[in-house]
Each structure stands twice: as structure tokens, then as C-alpha cells.
Image (cartoon, grey):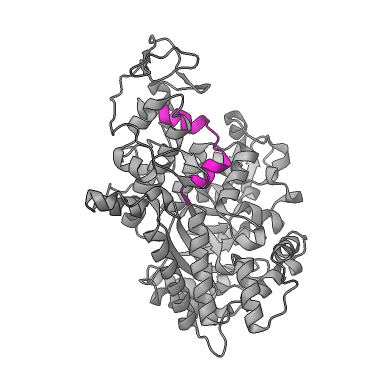
């Protein structure tokens, strides 16, 4: 029954920005050269004698923002002219990669795939191998720092020490909430030659055991179809190497079709133009987002019909790497209105949607901000955020048995813990159903940017009775002194903080026919149904 309570709360509760910051996150689409710190740009520019538009930190941040939101592609690309100039020395690549890890970890990211094009940094002093090794070094140094100074690792460390030494460690004072893993995707640019793309593809294969987990083709879609680099994709497929392709961002369905059916892409970078293949079932014409309700109902969705390509992408669970803010800047969404962005519709239609940052500097964004926009604009709940987070982790290019522990031991317990603490004042017994190990990792109320510990109960699960009889607190109920418990008659409704808790029969009905990315049991164990949450028809590890 406790899982039914949690599921009800997850499906109804809208997290606050503070809670979103505390949640674990996964980012699959982020460009290294689009995420530099403005302060780092100013320092490196001074060292290399590069003249910036301004050397004032606040004014430089404003310059990037105005350039990227001007509606001019030329002005947008000028921002990358600046950042790429800052990445022409080995030590600067190490620094920028390391700071990228720190910034993501502070935002609660637990797994990231960061992409970059080595060809952009080649000069007389740097070849591609040196560039890749420098970025790898920066990522490794950043991960080492974060993974030694987070709540998770300090808790584990204290558990292995004598009590006297363990008492000296306070995990709640750790700089970071979670451990982090960062992998690289090597990019080539579609406007460049096929020979360069082949070279970068071979480099991805060469460094596949050194945290390079895949390959990508980026750059302008219009006039540069992905099939131009088919030789590179053939080499990757022969070596069983993962790859994604920017497609469906500034060009329509043909780009998406080629990326999947000709080139064999496993994921779609952006992919939002897939909306062009979703029709009004009555008229057979492509839908217009402005004609749809902001939060479509089930009945609204039944009025839509998927075209062949749109259906194929959903059926095959091909991941969409959606970057909402970036899509507004580049004109993917009419009138730059987030309410007209198809991300929520695609999410409701059960596509494997992920939410990403693309370029944190250019978009002035973070994962916390992107997810907050989903909550504020479309009313997303904890369940929605968990689903896109698990979608991203499942779609990562690391091995299945490396993805599962991050979902099982980090993402799901943290969501459950934060939901439990959200209702701890009115429903204290929920904390007793968070396992003691997970409580020690993520226990305590959300406070500022960190999770602080509290000792509330021990691990435990209660069996399912078929009817809701036990509750820990009902709205306006009188509580006894000992356990703050009361029983309701079988016909009464369970209400926690004005949220009606579904019956177990209702929960089971909701789960019937669910897709592999349905938010299932968020408990501590993976049960039979939950295999679908962490892998497609794969046995439990």
C-alpha cells in the first residue's frame, strides 16, 4: 500500500524549484563549448590577448544572452566564435572540462554525456588525440573531486570507519549531493567533409574504453543531410559503437527519416519537428500546437493520429534529446513561446522524451531551470520529472549493467525520499518506508541546495491488503499521541495534503498496458513490473 501512496503523491505533487534543485538529473545533450563559465572566458581571454565585447562579468553574461536571443543565427553563432577561441590550449581544455563537471554536480546531475567536436580545437600545438586526452583528464579530475565530496560517498566512508572517526564526518556538509559520471560524445560537423567525419568516428572507437561512449553529427541540417557522412556511420555500426544525430531541429521530417532509416541513429538530437507527422485524426492535416489545450486530456490525445514516421519513432523507443530553451532561441518553436513547444505533447503521447540544456552558457540555463520550466508551463509533477530522468538514464550509451545501479540506487531512492519529506510534517510515517540505507544517503528535509539528515524510522514495507485501511494522517483528522495513526472504514477516502490517494485497484488499472518507461513502483527493490523501468525486456541484474 505504501507504494500506492507514493505513486499517488508522485502523480499529483508539483515540485518546488528548491526540490527540483535537490532531485538527481541526467543530461544527454550538452555541448562542451556551449557551457563555459563567463569568468573563465574573461581570464583566458586576458592570457591569450583576445579582445572580448566586455571584460565585465555581468555585462558579458548579458552579451551572450542578447546575442543568443536576438533571432539572428549569425549573432548566435558569434557566441561560439568566442568560446572556441578559449579552447585552443591544452591546459584550458582541461580546466573547462573540469569546471563543467563541477557545475553539473552543483546542479544535481548524476550522469552526463558531454559532446564536442575535436576538429574545432586543432591547431599547430594540438592534434585530435591531445585534445581528447585533455578533455578526458579534465572530466576525470572533476569526477574525482565530486565523487570524494558528496553526501553519498561520505556516508559510505563513515560506515566503514570506527565510530569515533565516523562521528567526525558530517555528510550533510558535503559540497555536492550526489556522485557524478561524465562521458564524452565526439562530434563532427555535417558541413565539413566526410573524411573528417570518418576520422572522428575512428577516434570515438579508439577511445571507447576511456569514457568516450559515442559519436554525433552536429551543425546545420538544411542543405547538409546526414547521409553525406554515411561512411562514418557504417564504420561505427561495424564496431558496435553508439551514435546519435542532430535531426529534426531546424529541418523537418526528411532529416529525421534519414538519421534513423539510412544512418541508423539510436537517438535524435532535438527531434522536435517530429510534430509535423502528428495529424488531426478528423482532418488528416498536421496539428497546429496553438490549436491544442496547454495540458491536453486523454480525450484530446485520442483525436490525434500518428504518421508512419512518428509511429515508428515511438514504437522503437527512439530517444528524443529535447532542449526546450535552446529550441526557442533557434526558432524551432513559433513565436518563441514555450507553451507552443511540443515537448509536453510528445511526453503525454509516451515518446521517450528527455529534457536537456544544449548550451548552458548560450541559453543561460541549467537542468534545474529546464525542468522548472516544464513544471511551471505544463504542470509537470514529480512523476513526470522522474519519468524523463529515467528515460535519459535508460537511453545513455553506457552498458546496461552500469545504468541500472544509477536508476536503482540513486535516482529512484532520491525521488522517493524527497517526496516523503515533502509530506513528513503531515504524514510522518512515510519516512519509515524509505529504506534505512537510502535514508542515510538522501535523508532529511530539503534545505537550500542540500539534503540534511534526520533520524526518522527504520526500513520497512507493509503488505498490500487490496483496500486502503491504514493511513498515517488524514486531512483534518485527530491524531493520537503514540503513532499518529488512525483507521478509516473501507469506504472512506484517503487524503494527504489535499491529494486523494488512489486505491490499489486504481493503481493497478493505471499500470495496465504501461510502456517500458511508465513510472512504476518507486520502492527500494526492482520488482517484476519494474524491470521495464530500467531496461527494455532485460533480466534484472
Q: Quadrant of residue 236?
A: bottom left
Q: Nearer the viewer, residue 113 or 320?
A: 113
Q: Which residues are magenta?
A: 5-25
Give above or below for 352 relative to 40.
above
Q: Nearer the viewer, residue 311 or 179?
A: 179
* Tag count: 0
Residue 164 is situated, as x and y percent measured from the top left of the image, at 25, 50
Q: Quadrant of residue 212?
A: bottom left
Question: In this image, 27 relative to 209: left or right?
Answer: right
Which residue is at a point 60% across and 66% down the rendered structure image? Answer: 37
**Residue 96 shows in this picture:** yes
Residue 158 colored in magenta in the image = no
Which residue is at a point 63% across and 82% down the rendered structure image? Answer: 47
Q: Nearer the viewer, residue 370 or 304?
A: 370
Q: Which residue sits furthest left?
A: 162
Assign the magenta stretch its main secondary structure.
Answer: helix
The N terminus appears in which quarter of the rendering?
A: top left
Amino acid at each position: 500500500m505504501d507504494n500506492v501512496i507514493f505513486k499517488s503523491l508522485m502523480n499529483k505533487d508539483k515540485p518546488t524549484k528548491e526540490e527540483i534543485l535537490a532531485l538527481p538529473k541526467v543530461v544527454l545533450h550538452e555541448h562542451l563549448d556551449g557551457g563555459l563559465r563567463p569568468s573563465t572566458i574573461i581570464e583566458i581571454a586576458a592570457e591569450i590577448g583576445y579582445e572580448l565585447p566586455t571584460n565585465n562579468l555581468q555585462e558579458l553574461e548579458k552579451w551572450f544572452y542578447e546575442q543568443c536571443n536576438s533571432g539572428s543565427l549569425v549573432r548566435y553563432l558569434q557566441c561560439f566564435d568566442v568560446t572556441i577561441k578559449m579552447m585552443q590550449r591544452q591546459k584550458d581544455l582541461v580546466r573547462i572540462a573540469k569546471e563543467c563537471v563541477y557545475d553539473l554536480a552543483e546542479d544535481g546531475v548524476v550522469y552526463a554525456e558531454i559532446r564536442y567536436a575535436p576538429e574545432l580545437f586543432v591547431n599547430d600545438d594540438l592534434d585530435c588525440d591531445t585534445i581528447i586526452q585533455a578533455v578526458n583528464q579534465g572530466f576525470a579530475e572533476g569526477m574525482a573531486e565530486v565523487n570524494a565530496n558528496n553526501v553519498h560517498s561520505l556516508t559510505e566512508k563513515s560506515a566503514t570507519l570506527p565510530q569515533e572517526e565516523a562521528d567526525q564526518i558530517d555528510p550533510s556538509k558535503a559540497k555536492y549531493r550526489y556522485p557524478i559520471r561524465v562521458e564524452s560524445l565526439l562530434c563532427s560537423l555535417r558541413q565539413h567533409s566526410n573524411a573528417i567525419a570518418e576520422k572522428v568516428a575512428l577516434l570515438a572507437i579508439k577511445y571507447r574504453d576511456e569514457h568516450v561512449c559515442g559519436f554525433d553529427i552536429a551543425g546545420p541540417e538544411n542543405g547538409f543531410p546526414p547521409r553525406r557522412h554515411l561512411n562514418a556511420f557504417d564504420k561505427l555500426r561495424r564496431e558496435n559503437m553508439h551514435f546519435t544525430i542532430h535531426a529534426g531541429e531546424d529541418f523537418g521530417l526528411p532529416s529525421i527519416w534519414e538519421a534513423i532509416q539510412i544512418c541508423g541513429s539510436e537517438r535524435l538530437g532535438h527531434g522536435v519537428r517530429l510534430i509535423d507527422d502528428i495529424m488531426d485524426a478528423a482532418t488528416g492535416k498536421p496539428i497546429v500546437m496553438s490549436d491544442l489545450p496547454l495540458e491536453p486530456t486523454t480525450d484530446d490525445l485520442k483525436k490525434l493520429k500518428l504518421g508512419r514516421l512518428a509511429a515508428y519513432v515511438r514504437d522503437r523507443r527512439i530517444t528524443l534529446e529535447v532542449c526546450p530553451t535552446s529550441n526557442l532561441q533557434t526558432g524551432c518553436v513559433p513565436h518563441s513561446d514555450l507553451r507552443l513547444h511540443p515537448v509536453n505533447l510528445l511526453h503525454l503521447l509516451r515518446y521517450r522524451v528527455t529534457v536537456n540544456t544544449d548550451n548552458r552558457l548560450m541559453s543561460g540555463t541549467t537542468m534545474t531551470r529546464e525542468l522548472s520550466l516544464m513544471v511551471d508551463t505544463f504542470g509537470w509533477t514529480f512523476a513526470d520529472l522522474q519519468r524523463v530522468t529515467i528515460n535519459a538514464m535508460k537511453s545513455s550509451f553506457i552498458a546496461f549493467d552500469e545504468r541500472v545501479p544509477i536508476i536503482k540506487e540513486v535516482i529512484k531512492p532520491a525521488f522517493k525520499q524527497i517526496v516523503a519529506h515533502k509530506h513528513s510534517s503531515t504524514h510522518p510515517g512515510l519516512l519509515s518506508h524509505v529504506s534505512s540505507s537510502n535514508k542515510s544517503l538522501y535523508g532529511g528535509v530539503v534545505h537550500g541546495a542540500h539534503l540534511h539528515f534526520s533520524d526518522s524510522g527504520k526500513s520497512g514495507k507493509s503488505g498490500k491488503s487490496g483496500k486502503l485501511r491504514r493511513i498515517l494522517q488524514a486531512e483534518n483528522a485527530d491524531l493520537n499521541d503514540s503513532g499518529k495513526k488512525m483507521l478509516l472504514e473501507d469506504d472512506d477516502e484517503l487524503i494527504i495534503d489535499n491529494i486523494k490517494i488512489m486505491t490499489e485497484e486504481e493503481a493497478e488499472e493505471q499500470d495496465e498496458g504501461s510502456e517500458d518507461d511508465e513510472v512504476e513502483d518507486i520502492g527500494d527493490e526492482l520488482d517484476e513490473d519494474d524491470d521495464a523501468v530500467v531496461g527494455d525486456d532485460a533480466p534484472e541484474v
